[in-house]
Image: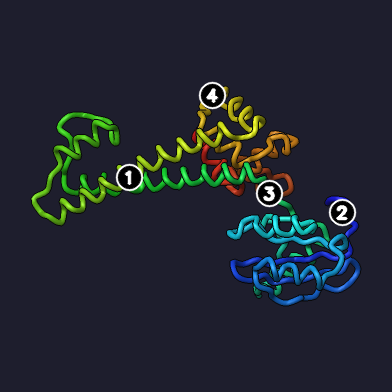
Amino acid sequence: MSKSIVEARRFVGLDVHAETIAVSVAEKDGEVRSLGVIPNRLSSIRKLMGKLGDASTWRACYEAGPTGYTLYWQLTRLGIECMVVAPSLVPVKAGDRVKTDRRDAERLARSFRAGELTPVWVPDAAHEALRDLVRAREAAKADQLRARHRLGKFLLRHGRRPSERMNAWTERHLDWIRREVKFEQFAQQATLEDYLAEVDHLGQRIVRLEKAINEAIEGAPSTMKAVVSALQALRGVGKMTAVTIVAEVGQLSRFAKARQLMGYSGTVASENSSGERTRRSAITKTGNAHLRRVLVEA
């Protein structure tokens, strides 16, 4: 826990949603109380600051989620120290079966005061922009795989196979589909053309995104470009893998040990040991899934 958090007199828990924020505050040596629900708007956050008083006396936290880091940047620009925490590591009582926004905010405030929360890395503007682009390409690759599966299963279902051996989804294979595969039924021909057009469209989409990634790396800070270049010296690591690692991890130096980096990716062995028994099994898969995918692939 940082020195500034230790010196805080109030600890504010924020349960953040797209339209609302549930707010609770834990006094340093006092009660935990709810301050109600406010709209998720900058003007409402400014009013909350007026209610809580001097910004140097309180700290805020909220769980990482689909709303991203917008609230973090808003609070930081207003002079508020904010922590974005890992949702899976927030302490929860085993017998607690009631979940509401108010109770979630109170639990965050209480755990924040106790120093039991684990912060996540908040990317800077350059890393966040690159990560969005890299994940857009990853989504396009997943869409391409689904589109190819649809077309491939359609051809298999109707017994359409090339007369000579060829690798699937090469330009030669796609040319064979365009030239040789025809259906007498209009509906089936329309289905084929639609499936094929989607495969072609996604191929063009991936080319555009990879070109954009190359341009983004050329315009990136020199330190980021140096890491991307250095990672490609490793066996199995190409440019897209290196860019993904940099976009998802950020500063590699923030990990003191290699085990911490592997734990962040979820590629360390899970363990269930008790007494004299030691039992380890498959990797935990609890870290960054995007990073884990490229590491396993490499």
Image spot of residue 225 (x, y percent): 61, 30
Instruction: For label 4, count other residues whose C-alpha is less than 10 Å away and answer few (under 14), some (14-19) or many (20+).
Output: few
The CA distance from mark 3 to mark 4 is 29 Å
| Precedes in sequence: disc 2 or disc 1 | 2
Residue bearing the label numbered 1: 201
Label 3: how many residues lie within 10 Å, few (<14), some (14-19) or many (20+)?
Answer: some
Residue 271 appears in view: yes
Mark 1 or mark 3, which is nearer the start of the sequence? Answer: 3
Report the residue marked by disc 4: 235
Q: Mark on residue 39?
A: none
Real-space CA distance between mark 2 and mark 4, rounded to the nearest whole angstrom: 43 Å
Residue pointed to by mark 3: 122
Residue 164, image x and y in percent? 17, 29
3D distance between C-alphas at marks 3 and 2: 18 Å
**Mark closest to the chain's N terminus, 2 or 4:** 2
What x and y, as percent, mark residue 229?
58, 26
Q: Residues within 10 Å of mark 1 (few under 14, many from 20)?
A: few
191 displayed left or right of 87: left
| Camera-side residue of 235 and 36 | 36
Tag 1, which secondary structure?
A: helix
